[in-house]
Amino acid sequence: MTILEKVAYLRGLSEGLGIDESSKEGRVLKAIIDVLDDISLTVTDLEDDVAELSDGLDEIDEDLGALEEEFYGDECDDECSCEDDDDEDDELYEVTCPACGDSIYVNEEMLDEGFIHCPNCHEKLEFDFDCDCDCEDCDSCSGEESDHE
């Protein structure tokens, strides 16, 4: 039973009981039922508006999804790990800017340059890698011939 139906039931009930609308109590009951009727109409209109907005929002969400698919294609987002990507140069590393605390994702090429500028605060972030391993041959660590002997 909807709110409109409940208010109509109350109106019919008060009319069926033969409440005298000229008495103080009768005027109060009639005024209460009139207010309930107005409220129920407003609530029904709001429910219809919300349903319409929800449908429109769903359509916008679907359109946005289609646009994202068209624009980005099959590119992976930051949370994706592609199994078919065997190129290690595309591996991303998370770096935290000491100036602003922003997390930045960098790849091998960016690290090889030795520095980047933070996209958030533009602070220069320098990368200097020294081999910390105890291996004899550091080719696997740095990708270059090592002078360690």
Image (cartoon, grey):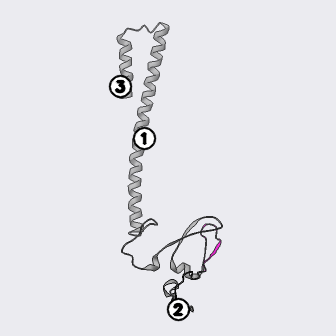
Seen at 44% across and 66% down, the residue is 77
Q: Quadrant of residue 61?
A: bottom left
Image: magenta residue range: 115-128
Q: Is residue 36 magenta?
A: no
Residue for badge 3: 5
Residue 63 in the image: x percent, y percent? 39, 57
Q: Which mark is residue 145?
A: 2
Seen at 50% across and 8% down, the residue is 24
- Identified by mark 1, the residue type is Val
Q: Nearer the viewer, mark 1 or mark 2?
A: 2
- Identified by mark 3, the residue type is Glu
Seen at 45% across and 14% down, the residue is 29
Q: Quadrant of residue 83?
A: bottom left
Q: Which mark is residue 71?
A: none
Residue 72 in the image: x percent, y percent? 42, 68
Residue 85 in the image: x percent, y percent? 39, 76
